[in-house]
Image: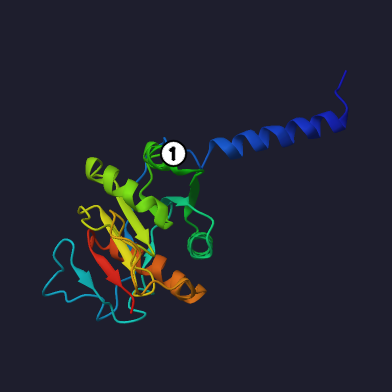
Amino acid sequence: MRPPLRAVATLAVAAALVTGCSSGDDWSRPHPKPTAVGTLGPGFTDPSAPPNPEATVTPRPGTWTGVHPSKGYRVVLLTAGDDRPTKALVTAVKDWAEEERVDLRTVVADDPSDLVPSITRALEMGPDLIVSAGNDLVDSLALVTPSHLSQQFLVVGAELAEPTHNVTAVDWSGASFRGEGLGMSSTYDPDSFTTVRCAAAIRAGVAAVLNDLTGIVIWLD
């Protein structure tokens, strides 16, 4: 006896869902090294004098817009805090990922005791890049990142006081939180975390990482 058509259709949909979940989004599978698609514009940095580690560079505005990640770029958005600047950064990262068709996953630190564990969870996922949004994560990143030099990190809207070569930051005078007991910058301005500024931060930072300009601070002012 043939099964009812409705049952056949239900089984077909279920099989399709299982197939969809098991292909294309499995980060345990082999993955080619990401590359930059496009080139940085003149004035992002001086090609004849590459920036030293921990240097601060001020790119010419828009010199990063021609750079895009290669297909299948795997990014973890690591975030903590529900303040307006953090929310603006999170929205910018998600919008960028959608526009660039990046494979984005999100890890949220629920409370202060979860900051280091959240970084560990992000590391265990094995992404090409971990993007951090939220001042609460800065001190924990300073603690963890030197022990994971093969993993690239990008901090948007803040920076580490003494970053290792795998930690790149994008900052501006209205942000510039550095943690480690240094306190909030006197120029901190939540209103500076505009949609345009946050969008520029993620794009400029990723462009730098894809071009191996890492361990530096990109200043957007």
User: Which residue carries the number 1 mark?
Assistant: 113
Q: What residue appears at the point 45 percent right and 39 percent down from the top-left corner?
A: 114
Amino acid marked by disc 1: Ser
Kind of element beneath mark 1:
helix
Q: Residues within 10 Å of mark 1 (few under 14, many from 20)?
A: few
**Is 34 in front, or is 155?**
155
**Picture quadrant where residue 133 is located:** bottom left
Q: Is residue 110 above or below residue 40?
A: above
Q: Is residue 30 above or below residue 32?
A: above
Q: Is residue 140 above or below residue 98?
A: above
Q: Position of residue 30 (x, y in %)?
A: 37, 38
7 on left or right of 106: right
114 on left or right of 172: right
Give the residue furthest to the top. 1
Q: Position of residue 179 (x, y in %)?
A: 31, 56
Residue 182 seen anywhere in this rendered image of the structure:
yes
**Is 157 in front, or is 112?**
112
Give the residue furthest to the left. 48
Q: What residue appears at the point 39 percent right and 71 percent down from the top-left corner?
A: 188
Q: Position of residue 94 (x, y in %)?
A: 52, 59
Q: Quadrant of the C terminus?
A: bottom left
Q: Quadrant of the N terminus?
A: top right
195 on left or right of 174: right
Colour option used: rainbow
Residue 37 seen anywhere in this rendered image of the structure:
no
Q: Is residue 39 above or below residue 90?
A: below
Q: Position of residue 19 (x, y in %)?
A: 60, 35
Q: Count of labels shown?
A: 1
